[in-house]
Amino acid sequence: MRFTHTTPFCSVLSTLGLFAVSPAYSSIVRNDVDYQYFRDFAENKGAFAVGASNISIQDKQGKILGRVLNGIPMPDFRVSNRQTAIATLIHPQYVNSVKHNVGYGSIQFGNDTQNPEEQAYTYRLVSRNPHPDYDYHLPRLNKLVTEISPAALSSVPLLGNGQPKANAYLDTDRFPYFVRLGSGTQQVRKADGTRTRTAPAYQYLTGGTPLKVLGFQNHGLLVGGSLTDQPLNTYAIAGDSGSPLFAFDKHENRWVLAGVLSTYAGFDNFFNKYIVTQPEFIRSTIRQYETRLDVGLTTNELIWRDNGNGDSTLQGLNERITLPIANPSLAPQNDSRHMPSEDAGKTLILSSRFDNKTLMLADNINQGAGALQFDSNFTVVGKNHTWQGAGVIVADGKRVFWQVSNPKGDRLSKLGAGTLIANGQGINQGDISIGEGTVVLAQKAASDGSKQAFNQVGITSGRGTAVLADSQQIKSENLYFGFRGGRLDLNGNNLAFTHIRHADGGAQIVNHNPDQAATLTLTGNPVLSPEHVEWVQWGNRPQGNAAVYEYINPHRNRRTDYFILKPGGNPREFFPLNMENSTSWQFIGNNRQQAAKQVAQAENARPDLITFGGYLGENAQTGKAAPSYSKTNIEWVNGPNTPHKPSPYTNTPTRTGAGVPTITASKKAATPAPTSHGMPTAPKTGNFSDMTGEAAIEKNRHIANAAVYGRPEYRYNGALNLHYRPKRTDSTLLLNGGMNLNGEVLIEGGNMIVSGRPVPHAYDHQAKREPVLENEWTDGSFKAARFTLRNHARLTAGRNTAHLDGDITAYNLSGIDLGFIQGKTPECYRSYHSGSTHCTPNAVLKAENYRALPVTQVRGDITLNDRSELRLGKAHLYGSIRAGKDTAVRMEADSNWTLSQSSHTGALTLDGAQITLNPDFANNTHNNRFNTLTVNGTLDGFGTFRFLTGIVRKQNAPPPQTGRGQPRRIPNPRQKHRTRTSNNRIACTCEPQSETQPPSPIHPPKRLCRFGCLPLHPPQKQQRIQPVQPAQRGRTSN
């Protein structure tokens, strides 16, 4: 039965009776549940992160209505296009939807945000591929999608005509759970049936569970029931056609795409129909766009020529092969929603029969929407020729040497778990998006010394790794981490950024090189001059805050007006005509120079706040050191040569005739591949890319190493340094994604804050705000070999920092703040929606939220020099302090310090803090280990000291109170011949005394301490030490 977009029809259903059906458009949800649940569900945010389960749902009065996803992990909804979810990816180049959706011609994937660093790519539909019988189509895209993996398809049995057995989804033992999402006209419904519209069509996504699956008809699943049957039930109405229905397959323990939404039964009947996914139609459609080469080669080279008019030939085969490519003579159709010129290009699959061969471009090749899929090792060459197409797929365990460029403005999509080694020559003006596997950036220099592997490098989906052969491969400002990021392997090289462009916490910078340290430098933004403000065209979002729009106003005698986009504004809203402001635009004048100056001044007046929310260092649990090939050469082994060491591209030694590049310890020149006569040619040095009839390979040990280090099994955490050298004194760098560095963190000015981050929630379009909940933050952990602070720098371990590991040394009036302090510690976070960083300088949390904060566990030794200071908040320091007399240590309430060894401080101020001199005091072990704390300045405030002493031998009196200005020594003496029975645990309380201390160079005058001590008798293991009451304390004389 054919469905149309506008004509309702009637159908007799055995289980449902008679009802009118219209094309489906979005969803109605119940109004007694917070709307944020449905928004978060659709965007995998809040409690509905991928993999979450057993989630309680409350009504607006706090009553628990039930649980969703009981024992079943939350699916990944990002396989559907962002913002509308009218199409779902089922293959790297194909989406499925309903064919009555005729209005869309492009889609994007990833998070639906206004963050300019999301770098969402627009994929164009080149063909729609409608099903001949059902409301279903399979559009083909112009590029391989790199942001996500396709949705899984069900393996339900097929009928004789190739159609899926739709009633298989009625088996609740196999398919116990269904979920959906969609966009369009959004409504909420009260129990009495009253509906309220919350948004027009296609503004944002909502999701939840569908109505109950009741039956099937014409290869469609029928669902119906009430919104109150489940806590998060949704009903699809106008605007949701083509949105997905996912089913959990308990037999295969995974979510599968069951169907796409086609129709609904009006506003009151509450029935929907989903067209079941058509796997055989999908397979047959994709096959018609593919050419697989299995025929033999007559030489080691396959020569590719463009014959014009969409026709190309591949020479060097046993038979002549013609491959359709882009045909520029074919004009766009249907307002560019169908692009026949690109659709003409087919995908070329090079099977494993062509292992270690060369594909040579004799002309510029535009393959249109055709891709290159390598199921074997290959080298692609083409001196001064370019390749353009849907992208490149390299099979797992395979490598492709890529020695061609793509045109300026074109993006190369890289997929497949294998390795692409970009080692052409000179400057490549094309871009690349790495969605899977490894890409080694190893471009060779041109005769003038210039080189660039790609103009712009994007790493996305979390599945890909880019490896630098050297630091000149890319411009750092042209590298970005897109949706869910991936790894950038510095590979022993140094790279500097003003800030790292990244969409979310999936970005990761590593050094997998076990032999060479790498350094990552961040400088923050410089003082902005008017000449460097950003000029943006109408309809586009700016990359930063300092952006100006120019409008030649045709309605006012072509007067030139200048505007800036307001926060949250729509860049596609029309400019005001009369030199005024609007909802989205702020008018800033008619003079270009004055407009630029005004924007620059406003930008410089704002604090420089930048965030890196990704991870620094390697956190893979299985990473191991790769074998070092830094002093070896590459041999190309084929025929009589037998290698002596494992290949860097395989895990086993290469056998005779295998024909893969092998690292050997020989210092002779590399041996090229044999010619068609089967015998190796004379050895040549350098680059083999010009060798006729021979396999092309780069004789460069760094490239070989990079190809090894980029492999997942060799994710070794090599030495990586982080240097923060801000160009402005008011710069702040927020790190909230985590850190595991086998290197130094050097802070040379400015502020570095490490902290946790808020749990992301979907944007609230009704309130026009991003929900950031004070009681919903995730913890962060940060580790480095050492932290060094210079030039008035400050390091802050803020809220929800669970762990900070590493020695810390401060110079030149620098400051260290460890642990959150009410009213003193800044609370900073990066907006998931806008990408901007927000800071509250002296944050005060609600009491219950402060109590719930983790105690920051700090492990490492701290050294203070040059009037630097340390402040401990809600933290526990395990380590020593070595501080000069002109330094200060302040311990706030809820702070603890356990000495790992004897320590000395300058001024020491306590505000309800606790110091433990013996590292094993709490568990009453290792009682022969004693430390001494020496205070070389004033000792102020109120706190508790815990240490071991020998009461029986009377060899350790309570802490003495020495004269003013003299060092205070809080002893824990080592006693000769001491036995464990003579050791006692002592708690001493330091309280303010009436006399005031001499002026301190850092702190204002405060009161001196006097001590009262009591023994803590065992057994008190794991028992909290209670404060000693004043009436019970012994007092020491002044």
Image (cartoon, helix red, strand yellow):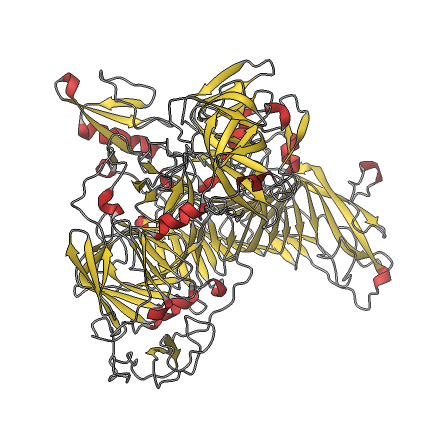
In x, y percent, where is residue 753? 49, 44
Q: From the image, which quarter does the N terminus lie in?
A: top left
Above-or-below relation of 872 to 949: above
Of residues 998 and 482, the one nearer the viewer is 482
The image quadrant of residue 373 is: bottom left
**Residue 719, how many percent across, how many down?**
46, 63
In the image shown, does 806 or 630 lie closer to the viewer?
Answer: 630
**Image coordinates for residue 694, horizontal then vertical, percent:** 25, 76
Q: Determine the residue positioned at 24% across, 85% down.
A: 682
Give residue 670's quadrant in the image. Answer: bottom left
Is 525 rendered above or below residue 559? below
Residue 732's quadrant in the figure?
A: top left
Q: Is residue 18 above or below residue 774?
A: above
Position of the C terminus, as image quadrant, is top right
| Residue 171 position in % (x across, y down) | 62, 41
Confirm whether residue 793 shows in the render: no
294 vs 507, left or right, is left
Residue 614 visible within the image: yes
